[in-house]
Image (cartoon, rainbow, N blue to C red):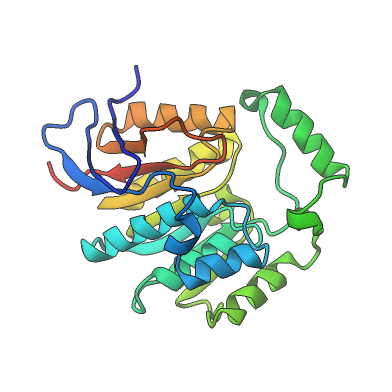
Amino acid sequence: MLPQHESIGDRITPVTIVGPSCRSAERETIPSDDPTAEHDQLTKSSREVKSRNLTYLPFHNLRVIERCIAEVVDDGVPGIFLEAGVALGGSAIAIASRMPEEREFHGYDVFGMFPPPGARDGAARQDRYREIASGLANGIGGDRYYAYEGDLFQKVAAAFASFGLAVDGCRVVLHQGLFEETLELRGVQVAFAHIDCGWYDSMKLCLERIYEAMSPGGFIVCDDYYGFEGAALAVDEFLMANPDVGRIEPERPPRSDSNLVLRRRAGP
């Protein structure tokens, strides 16, 4: 049985997150799907990464990320901001643009062809990966698929710079390599994390390592939960193992491209 969770309504409404053994709950405000307002609600940087084909995320997912960041900042949740699965850099730029000046952003990606799915990811994902590996996948709006770019790291760094965000190795850091080799968070606190990796093994590893560093009150936003069975299984197992993490989702049925919001309980 999965941890109990509450839902949110059609607009930005206070909700309660409840884990299976929580003795107290927290009030949260995360927006649900409102197609007529999604674009206008976004900040300029988020609208621009969409217009420049730098992210696969729909407007609503970007808005959810923005609101989570606003809440951890307002609540004074300590720690860095990070993204696992940077791809073209669009959502990473949106995150780094929203964080306070004194905070750090860390992005993790192979910045090239990513590893194949595993046995728990299902036949459809195996077929999709074969298409990608064969060189037949198309990018956003007919662009070249990002994993085929030989200089993707440099292109992502240039995209950051075009938004006034220098990848300087201090405030903005990009870590190139497999998650198991680069996602080391010992001695670090995490306030906000965005995980955009659809395979079971990758999602499981990211959740486990980020959780160990996640500040109470911090958010983890998981893309691919509703559309990738392996990612969903990893999240469900994670929630069962960590009852101090609550789950928030829209009241209306989510789309396959919707993201899932998790928050570590701030109180006892």
Whether residue 200 is situated above or below residue 62 in the rendered picture: above
Q: Which residue is found at the position 30% from the left and 52% from the top?
A: 218
Residue sitting at 66 percent across and 69 percent down?
Answer: 156
Q: Residue furthest top?
A: 1
Q: Nearer the viewer, residue 193 or 71?
A: 71
Quadrant housing the N terminus: top left
Q: Is residue 89 visible?
A: no
- Quadrant (top left, top right, bottom left, bottom right) of the C terminus: top left
- Location of residue 260 in the rendering, given as x and y in whole percent from the top left corner: 43, 40
The quadrant in which residue 117 appears is top right
Q: Nearer the viewer, residue 85 or 32?
A: 32
State the image coordinates of residue 229 (x, y, percent, origin top left).
57, 27
Query: Which residue is drawn at the image coordinates 54% and 83% (left, top)?
Result: 164
Left or right position of 19 against 138: left
Can you say whether 187 is above or below 167 in the image? above
Instruction: Indicate whether 147 appears above or below 258.
Output: below
Task: Answer with the quarter of the image where residue 166 lies.
Answer: bottom right
